[in-house]
Image (tube, helix red, strand yellow):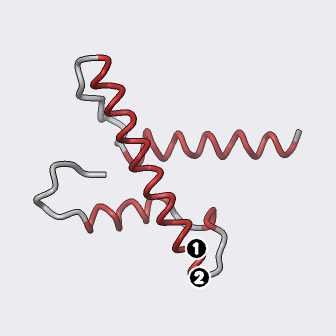
Amino acid sequence: MAALYNERWEIETTLDELKTHQRGPAQVLRSRSPEGVEQEVWGYLLVHHAIRSLMHTAAQDIDADPDRLSFTRTLRLVRRQVTAQAAFSP
């Protein structure tokens, strides 16, 4: 039961990363069609996966647990690397 409780909180943390930090608390999906909403959600999920993959690689480089790295700090770092010409912000 204790292991399941930990897994639940990992899922809750991921949802928080997506909804609060990556997308923003007041940001709503812009698409007006079901297909557009689906595309937008997939975009958010792909960006989240890319950031988590980057964190995993960085953790391996320093021989650390990826769960010990901050998603918010990594997201800020990635956003600083996106140029002004980009059509979107992760």
Label 1: element kind: helix
Toward the right, the furthest residue is 1
Toward the top, the furthest residue is 33
Q: Is residue 9 above or below residue 39?
A: below
Q: Quadrant of residue 11?
A: top right
Q: Quadrant of residue 14?
A: top right
Can you tell which mark lies on residue 29? none
Q: Is residue 65 above or below residue 79?
A: below
Q: Which residue is mark 1?
A: 59
Q: Residues within 10 Å of mark 2 (few under 14, many from 20)?
A: few
Amino acid carrying label 1: it is Ala
Q: Position of residue 12 (x, y in %)?
A: 61, 40
Can you tell which mark lies on residue 62? 2
Q: Position of residue 19 (x, y in %)?
A: 43, 39
For the residues marked 2 and 1, what is the alpha-carbon distance in whole angstroms? 5 Å
Q: Is residue 36 above or below residue 79?
A: above
Label 2: element kind: loop
Q: Is residue 32 above or below residue 6?
A: above
Is 68 left, or right, of 39 in this rendering?
Answer: right
Assess whether mark 1 and mark 2 are in contact (beta carbons under 8 angstroms): yes
Q: Position of residue 9 (x, y in %)?
A: 68, 43
Q: Position of residue 73 (x, y in %)?
A: 43, 65
At x 36% / y 26%, what residue is drawn? 38
At x 47% / y 65%, what residue is drawn? 54
